[in-house]
Amino acid sequence: MAEEEVSKLEKHLMLLRQEYVKLQKKLAETEKRCTLLAAQANKENSSESFISRLLTIVADLYEQEQYSDLKIKVGGRHISAHKFVLAARSDSWSLANLSSTEELDLSDSDRMICVIIYG
């Protein structure tokens, strides 16, 4: 009889652990959303928010050699780019498929594709 009780308690404990893990994931997602919303709400005071500062830094990287890990060839022009930005802004490119790429030749494409990607 005692073994049955122990077995029941172990099952309940396992269920409680699973629920705890789910709640922890939800908490992390909620904190992330809260931080993003706070960053959007404090746009005029962007120096206070980490995310706002990060977005400003990433925006300042546009066409900069510094930290660039990719070249995009558009016509006869080479544009310095950043793989993480392309991966974040595109469903077609991911960090995995860009990992070994050093240059994208988009000479046949419209120049606007780079403007769309980098905003």
Image (tube, helix red, strand yellow):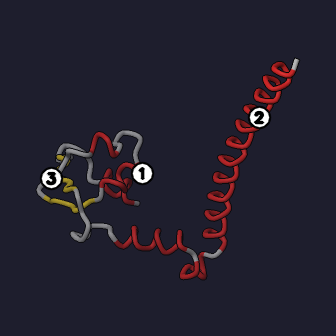
Crowd band around label 2 with a 10 angstrom C-alpha radius: few (<14), some (14–19), many (20+) = few
**1 or 2: tag closer to the N-terminus:** 2
Q: Is residue 92 above or below residue 70?
A: above
Q: In the drawing, what numbered circle is on residue 13?
A: 2
Residue type, numbered disc 3: Gly
Instruction: Please identify the quadrant where the C terminus is shown.
Output: bottom left
Distance of mark 1 from mark 3, alpha carbons?
24 Å
| Position of residue 68 in the picture relative to residue 1 (left or right) | left
| Position of residue 7 in the picture relative to residue 88 (left or right) | right
| Position of residue 32 in the picture relative to residue 78 (left or right) | right
Q: Position of residue 49 (x, y in %)?
A: 57, 75
Residue at image position (56%, 79%) is: 46
Residue type, numbered disc 2: Leu
Quarter of the image for residue 109 reads top left
Q: In the drawing, what numbered circle is on residue 75?
A: 3
Q: Residue furthest front?
A: 2
Marks 2 and 3 in Cβ contact (< 8 Å): no
Considering the numbered disc 1 on the image, is that residue within a helix, a strand or a loop? Answer: helix
Q: Position of residue 77 (x, y in %)?
A: 15, 59
Residue at image position (35%, 52%) is: 86
Distance of mark 1 from mark 2, alpha carbons?
40 Å
Considering the numbered disc 3 on the image, is that residue within a helix, a strand or a loop? Answer: loop
**2 or 3: tag closer to the N-terminus:** 2
Q: Position of residue 14 (x, y in %)?
A: 73, 32
Q: Residue furthest left?
A: 76
